[in-house]
Image: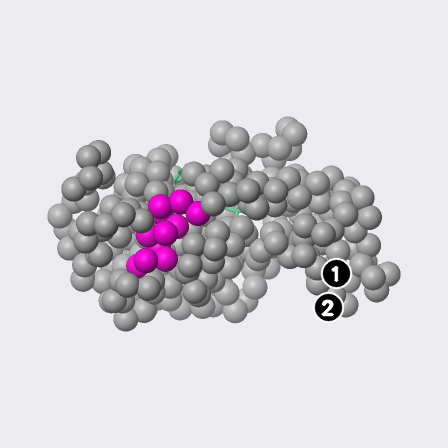
Amino acid sequence: MTEGALHLPADLAAAVRAAGHLVVLTGAGMSAESGVPVFRGQGGLWEGFRPEDLATPQAFGRDPERVWRWYRWRLDRVREAQPHAGHRALAALERDGGFERFTLVTQNVDAMHQRAGNRSVIELHGTITRAHCEAGCGRTAEAHEVDPAAALCACGRGRLRPSVVWFGESLPADAMDEAAEALEQADMAWVVGTSSVVYPAAALPGIAARRGVPVVEVNPEETPLTGQLPYSLRSSASAGLVALARARLGEREF
Ligand code: APR
């Protein structure tokens, strides 16, 4: 046992060992230790603006340059960031965990799970790395190549916009259906680093919890979900995921 390692309750460790289909749902707190800022709480503001004031079609319509500058700032943080031990633990679990089925669902738009080696990731809120034409002409671009001051699409009918889901927009139907189906079938779920206040993603853990399957939250803070779950680890994503992964894979470094 590594000194200072998080200790799991025995029944939780047993449930991790027994799980056939594990669903892991991640939010911005998953990437915090890699240096990607969270949206809410400390460090969540950008130039005094709340995400709800920037991540909307209306904000983009009013001031596309400001919205693009915010996304380019986030993208720069993402491109500098490296996956941490918790990301690597999830990649090891998908590869070596021996699950009948392993489903990773993320609200994050930073593609850090893919960079860490997870093969199939359901992205509920799109990706910050890409842009597409708001007029629907089908053109796409790499987000880091978009000039915030002149983001007009080559079709001339609209601007290039970040390929993320904004407040007031629908989630990609396929991604949401696949995530909900996985939580209906799962026999264990982990909910890591999300404030559990943004719907519909925040409703997903309840699908598994209502069926009585063990659902574990990993978050240094309490959330509206905490009281509804049988297990809650008050820990960082890296410490919590390393402890959970070791219950399945044995003592090893990630
Ligand atoms: N490890 C785990 N959790 C952490 C860590 C950490 N090291 N640091 C912070 N957290 C937790 C915070 O306590 C908080 O509960 O991560 C959570 C981050 O919450 P939000 O910033 O609200 O992120 P998220 O829940 O992913 O937001 C949902 O809101 O703005 C939209 O589309 C955006 O996908 C995002 C959605």
Image coords of residue 221 (percent x, y):
37, 34
Return the residue nearer the eye: 142 or 38: 142
Image coords of residue 137 (percent x, y):
77, 68
Colouring rule applied to residues: one colour
Beta carbon at label 2 within 8 Å of ligand 1: no
Dividing the image into 4 quarters, which one contains the N terminus? top left
**Residue at the spot of label 2:** 138
Q: Residues within 10 Å of mark 2 (few under 14, many from 20)?
A: few
* Position of 7 relative to 152 (above/below): above
* Drawn side of residue 175 relative to residue 55, left or right: left
- Tag of residue 183: none
Image coords of residue 65 (percent x, y):
77, 42
Residue at 75% from the left image edge and 56% from the top image edge: 160
**Residue at the spot of label 1:** 133
Is the Cβ of the residue at disc 2 closer than 8 Å to that at disc 1? yes
Residue at 51% from the left image edge and 58% from the top image edge: 124
Question: Which span is picked out in magenta?
Answer: 83-93
What amino acid is labelled 1 in the image? Cys
* Corner quadrant of residue 153: bottom right
Callout 1: helix, strand or loop? Answer: strand
